[in-house]
Amino acid sequence: MASKTMVQEWEDAIDYQKVKDWGAVRRMSLMVNTIEEMTCSSKCSELTTLLLQDNHYLKNLSGEVIQHMQKLVVLDLSSNLNISGLPDRISELNSLQYLDLSDTRVEQLPVGDVNLVKELQLLEHLQVLTIDVSSELGLQQILGDQRLMNCIYRLHIHDFQEKPFNLSLLVSMENLRELRVTSMHVSY
């Protein structure tokens, strides 16, 4: 019987593409590797969990990869400092419930750019979101959507330089379990 879980951690060179039976893989952990680009064919369509933490060379997941992962429930991209935007077509992950973007560069929500929030809003089944935010406008965009706001489990707010930030705005976040505030002026 083929293994349904692939775990490969702490390897300098991993060739996950040599997996013979992608159809059998349900959960994949490729944490702390030197992956630069993740590729996947239609054969990885049964994947429900993808853990890619600490792949410091990984820059993004392509839309081509995402389109083949329609059953994906858990996606952890945390601690990938080269990831600066959401993967293309992430809103097509209809089954996604857990998304960890902490300690990535996705924390930036540029002025006038509501695409990140729109993409996150399209993830209808999302239940847990961890994210870093470095602008008050970005935080307001996220807090402006009640469902999205209630998905946030861990929030890192940092580098607000415009004016003091009022922490009482976060009181209504039902599922917030961890709040980290750094390098900013705070009022309460």
Image (spheres, grey):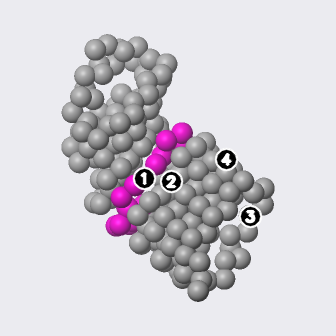
Image coords of residue 26 (percent x, y): 50, 73
Determine contact: label 1, label 2, CB under 8 Å.
yes
How many residues crowd mark 1 within 10 Å: few (<14), some (14–19), many (20+)? many
Q: Which residue is mark 4?
A: 56
Mark 3 vs mark 4, CA separation in Å: 14 Å
> Which quarter of the image is occupied by the N terminus?
bottom right
> Which quarter of the image is occupied by the C terminus?
top left
Residue 150 in magenta stretch = no
Residue 112 visible, this orientation: no
- For label 2, the SS is strand
Residue drawn at the location 59% of the way across and 78% of the way down: 3
Residue type of the residue flagged with mark 3 = Ile
Determine contact: label 3, label 4, CB under 8 Å.
no
Determine contact: label 2, label 3, CB under 8 Å.
no
Image coords of residue 146 (percent x, y): 21, 43
Q: Residue 37 occupies which quadrant of the picture?
A: bottom right
Q: Which residue is mark 3?
A: 14
Q: Which residue is mark 2?
A: 76
Residue 181 visible, this orientation: yes
Residue 9's disc number = none
Residue drawn at the location 71% of the way across and 76% of the way down: 18
The span shown in magenta is 90-105
In the rendered image, the residue lying farthest to the bottom is 1
Residue type of the residue flagged with mark 4 = His
Residue drawn at the location 78% of the way across and 60% of the way down: 13
Mark 4 vs mark 2, CA separation in Å: 14 Å
Q: Earlier in the sequence, mark 2 or mark 3?
A: 3
Q: Earlier in the sequence, mark 4 or mark 2?
A: 4
